Image (cartoon, helix red, strand yellow):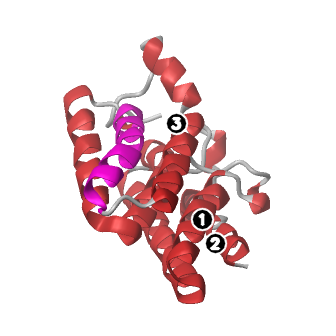
Amino acid sequence: MVALIAYIIGNFCSAFVLGKIFKKEDVREKGSKNAGATNALRVFGRQIGLVAFILDVLKGMLAVYIGNRLLGYNGMLIAGVFVVIGHNYPVFLGFRGGKGIAASIGVMLSWHWPTALVCIAIGVLVIVKFRYVSLGSITAAATVPIVGSLMNRPFNKEYFIATLILAIMAIIRHRSNIKRLINKEEFKIGERV
């Protein structure tokens, strides 16, 4: 039940909805062709991109809150994983969603905010230095299980597995970005499509 509720919440793809309402366009048909906040930023500009990001963070937090209320600690871990799955693979949008970073930030802020803040800081530093949002996102996601294990004491196997799943999903969803980074074809921050 928790997994299903979280998955359905994840299906609310902010970038898609905002693009349809304010621009009458499908964000998935432009730019990187995914329904995430970064693509909304590039395609529709700062305002829509920022609102999409905030809404995706909030939906991650909402799902974890509901999971915690229904099933306690394990419920919030389950909800956190499934809200990101719902964002990445939304049934209502033909399984063509975003890459899960903003939703994962919301989840991590709810699971263990100190870990979230450290990983966000790492991601931001990478973005500032190299100007690639994707590289910052991948780096931040990859550090979550490590930072989480070091900061969230005592060590919790279930928490570690959940953070590892989030990290793996983020890296998988960024496969095309990794390829473009290697080929030096990736969009830098601030570039409009």
Q: Mark 2 and mark 3 in contact? Answer it, CB < 8 Å.
A: no
Neighbours of disc 3 within 10 Å: few (<14), some (14-19), many (20+):
many
Is 120 in front, or is 96? 120
Mark 2 and mark 3: span between their CA atoms? 21 Å
Count numbered badges in the picture: 3
| Position of residue 145 measured from the top left corner of the image (x, y, whole percent) | 40, 47
Residue carrying label 1: 83
Is 95 in front, or is 116? 116
Is 147 in front, or is 23? 147
* Residue at 51%, 71% in the rendered image: 59
* Residue at 20%, 29% in the rendered image: 129
Q: Is-magenta flag for residue 84?
A: no
Mark 3 and mark 1: span between their CA atoms? 17 Å
Task: Identify which amino acid the numbered label 2 is placed on.
Answer: Ala
Residue that protrudes farthest toward the top in the picture = 183
Q: Mark 3 and mark 1 in contact? Answer it, CB < 8 Å.
A: no
Task: Identify which amino acid the numbered label 1 is placed on.
Answer: Val
Instruction: Give the quadrant of the N terminus.
Output: bottom right
Neighbours of disc 2 within 10 Å: few (<14), some (14-19), many (20+):
many
Lower position in the chain sequence, tag 2 or tag 1: 2
* Label 1 residue SS: helix
148 relative position to 161: left or right = left
* Residue at 66%, 41% in the rendered image: 29
Residue 191 versus residue 178 in the image, above or below: below
Residue carrying label 3: 171
Lower position in the chain sequence, tag 2 or tag 3: 2
**Magenta part of the chain:** 134-153
Mark sitting on residue 34 = none
